[in-house]
């Protein structure tokens, strides 16, 4: 029994000695600043899971229905903790900033 404990301990020490660290690159794509209320909600809700790169690469002719579907998808499929009352403002910000109503 002592040999088994010794072997397991030695294996754990060896795994720790050869563990590799992961270094993430700095995120250079930030959410486009806006005076819309949805900007702060987007930064606080959406940035916890992904960068603005996701929004930047969506079709530029995306309409509000598209953005609502994307936010709903994040909530339902990926379990994003976005309060229901924040969704309309986030959708408006995304559409006005990245979609077909961009200014």
Image (cartoon, rainbow, N blue to C red):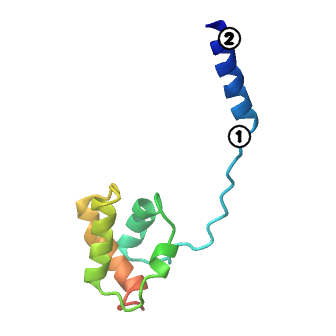
Q: Which of marks 1 and 2 precedes in the sequence?
A: 2
The vertical placement of 23 against 31, above or below, is above
Question: Going 69% across and 54% down the picture, which residue do you hit?
Answer: 23
Q: Quadrant of the N terminus?
A: top right
Question: Going 27% across and 74% down the picture, which residue do you hit?
Answer: 69
Q: Tell me where residue 42 appears, x and y as whole percent.
A: 40, 67
The quadrant holding residue 45 is: bottom left
In the image shown, does 80 or 37 lie closer to the viewer? 80
In the image shown, does 98 or 10 lie closer to the viewer? 10
Mark 1 packing: few (<14 Cα in 10 Å), some, or many (20+)? few
Q: Would you name the residue on which mark 1 appears?
A: 19
Q: Would you name the residue on which mark 2 appears?
A: 3
In the image shown, does 38 or 14 lie closer to the viewer? 14
Question: Going 49% across and 76% down the picture, which residue do you hit?
Answer: 33
Q: Tell me where residue 41 appears, x and y as whole percent.
A: 38, 65
Q: Tell me where residue 74 appears, x and y as whole percent.
A: 34, 64
Please state the total of marks drawn on the protein image.
Answer: 2
Tell me: 37 left or right of 49.
left
Tell me: 40 left or right of 13.
left
């Amino acid at each position: 029994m002592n040999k088994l404990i010794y072997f397991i301990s030695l294996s754990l020490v060896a795994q720790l000695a050869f563990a590799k660290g992961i270094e993430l690159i700095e995120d250079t794509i930030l959410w486009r600043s806006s005076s819309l209320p949805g900007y702060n909600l987007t930064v606080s809700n959406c940035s916890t899971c992904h960068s603005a790169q996701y929004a930047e690469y969506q079709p530029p002719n995306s309409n509000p229905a598209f953005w609502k579907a994307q936010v709903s998808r994040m909530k339902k499929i990926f379990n994003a903790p976005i309060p229901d009352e924040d969704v309309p403002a986030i959708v408006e910000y995304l559409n006005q900033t990245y979609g077909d109503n961009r200014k």
